[in-house]
Image: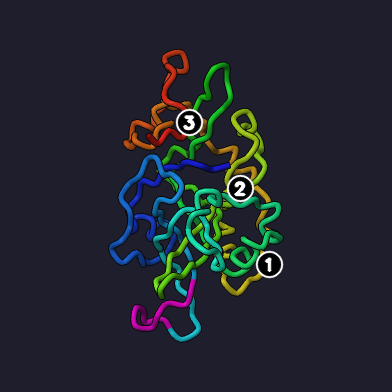
Amino acid sequence: MCGRYASTKDPALLAAEFDAVDGTGGEAPGADYNVAPTKHVMAVVERKPPQEESDAAEGEVERSIRVMRWGLVPHWAKDLSGAAKMINARAESVLEKPAYKQSAMKRRCIIPAAGWYEWQPGEGRKQPYFMTLGDDTSLAMAGIWSVWWKDDVPTVTCAVLTTGAIGALTRVHHRMPLLLPQDRWSAWLDPTSLDPSELLAPDPSIVEALELRPVSTAVNSVKNNNASLMERVSLEDEKPAPSLFETS
């Protein structure tokens, strides 16, 4: 699963890294070291831009950074209440589940992350780890998005695709985000391609490059949000902290 991650770059830096334009319209969230479900996040998409916003020729697509709400809400949902339960979509069934199928076929995105957090079971507590490339290179988490309307006002929502963990990650958790190498970005974002099935398998080379960094249990609380959450700690020095996903 992917239930928390870190997003540390502004839209200009992400636009440069992903060869995109900044389409956030000044609404981009700031650096967030403890991104939790239903927060606003940045994602990379390829769509036909409104002509009043771009000089692109008719029919051309533009890669841009957009703001979305984490937790996918299908267009047919009655309200936004189920979003927190739909932050992840399983890659193995995303093309079959009614809530995700159309988005997987037509509305795919990349959700950049400095890294994501996962909790390893242990005696009496779970130890959090931060999975990162550790060199300021963003991880490209495969995502899907949807638009939910109310009173002619759109809410754009997204979900992170997950797959079975491989390699060293299996020591921490049995699931992981589907991470896209750079040579898969264009194919994944291509809005004219309706069958992404060949892109749904994890890439071992990315996993092999990851650092599995033990971090403080301070990340357990969404109240805590600073760069120290990503820093390596000595497991011997760690002490029990509030329970996972504490919000009060």
The span from disc 2 to disc 3 (Cα, nearest Å) is 20 Å
Q: Main secondary structure of the magenta part?
A: loop
Q: Nearer the viewer, residue 178 or 86?
A: 86
Left or right of 143, for residue 90: right
Magenta residue span? 47-56
The residue lying at 55 percent from left, 48 percent from top is: 85
Q: Which residue is mark 2?
A: 162
Query: How packed is label 1: few (under 14 Cα within 10 Å), some, or many (20 or more)?
Result: few
Residue 80 in the magenta stretch? The answer is no
Say which amino acid is labelled 1. Answer: Asp
- State the image coordinates of residue 9 (x, y, percent, origin top left): 35, 50
Q: Is residue 74 above or below residue 134?
A: below
Q: Nearer the viewer, residue 124 or 160?
A: 124
- State the image coordinates of residue 144 (x, y, percent, origin top left): 55, 60
The residue lying at 61 percent from left, 33 percent from top is: 173
Q: Which residue is mark 3?
A: 244
